[in-house]
Amino acid sequence: MVRSEKKHRIIFIDLMRALAVLQMVQGHTVDVLLAPQYRLTEYPVYYLWNFMRGMTAPIFMFTSGIVFTYLFRLAPEPFAQNPRVHKGIKRFFLLVGLGYLLRYPTYKIFDFSDVTQDRWNIFFTVDVLQLIGFGLLFIIICAYLAEKLKLNDFLVFSTAAFLFFVSSPFIYKINFLEYFPQPIAAYFNDKTGSLFPLFPWAGYVVMGGVLGSYLAKNPLIFKTNKFSFNLAVFGIAFILISAVSVFISEKYFGITFKNNSYDLETITFRIGFVLILNSIVSYISQKMQSIPKIFILIGRNTLLIYIVHLLILYGSAWNPGIILLFGKSLNVTYTVISALLMITLMTLMVILLNKFKLRNKQLVT
């Protein structure tokens, strides 16, 4: 099942996109099913899994930013005529709408009389779909500013990502419920229960836009060792900055590092890790002229895979999820088998979609 690639197809992006969504599928499955007694960091395998689970969201969001911006910048038209602007805005509304639909508080559609405050809290939670939707919107805004102000993408996109990251520790301390209603306050930090508020998570999407723009403006650069080497150098630099910052904070200021998602040390480390992973995958894919078509199909159906596996695991207002029957109750063997079955099921789903020529949407393009 192999596809001949277009001359300038960036294979490593296809691989990164497939890797990101499959990692998310298995991560959710294991987290839903694995019993608490096996969740011990003393176990090397669990420690590694837990570490990679923490990296999944940054990888997924960074890759989303790469893909959208790469396709956006491939179009030679000015901003107002660029078809990707319209598509991106439509995708913004689609992703945000689906994000809320997955957490809809009642099966009765329009009757909210029985909805408890807990259900409303869950409904207003900002999750991956809303976050990526807003991330794409911010990329469009950055592209507009870059054109109007006659600035290069690197400066505008990097500055925007920097602002999301640097302001996160301060944004976290604010109780936005004192200033905004809950649906709006939920977008700023996790104090209302949001899993992926804009600060710092939107920064990873916009940061991916830096690399996406670079790839679009430098055709075939991804086929060079220099490209992979530079990604690795930047990645290592970010990790070293993180390590030095943690060392100085603990040794000279007595601040205990807690690895919170909004801490600058954690953000810097995650950026470094994502860059190194992109470096490795891009280096491996340099000599490839084609890849198994299934990887491309998985990348093309990320939105469907994401939604279907969540409905199976967590359920919705209209269907029960596996979590109600087996939540955090399985041993390691059954959990691993379940994760493999979930990946297999998602893979078969996209194969059948392709076989019957059913169209589906990617998550970000």
Image: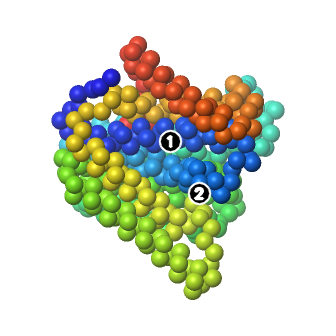
Which kind of residue does numbered mark 2 sit on? Answer: Phe
The quadrant in which the C terminus is found is top left
Q: Is residue 99 visible?
A: no
Dot 1 falls on a residue whose secondary structure is helix
**Residue at left 57%, top 42%?**
27
Residue identified by numbered label 2: 188
Residue 100 numbered tag: none
Residue 231 x/y as whole percent = 31, 59
Residue identified by numbered label 1: 23
**Quadrant of res 6:** top left
- Foreground residue, 88 or 66? 66
Q: CA distance from mark 2 to mark 1?
A: 26 Å
Residue 127 against residue 114 in the figure, above or below = below
Residue 21 x/y as whole percent = 48, 39
Q: Is residue 242 left or right of residue 210?
A: right
**Residue at left 70%, top 47%?**
38
Residue 207 against residue 347 in the figure, above or below = below
Residue 253 against residue 7 in the figure, above or below = below
Residue 272 against residue 101 in the figure, above or below = below
Residue 13 x/y as whole percent = 33, 42
Give the class, few, some or many, for how many residues have Cα within 10 Å of label 1's Cα (few <14, many ≥20). Answer: many
- Foreground residue, 115 or 334? 334
State how the image is colored: rainbow
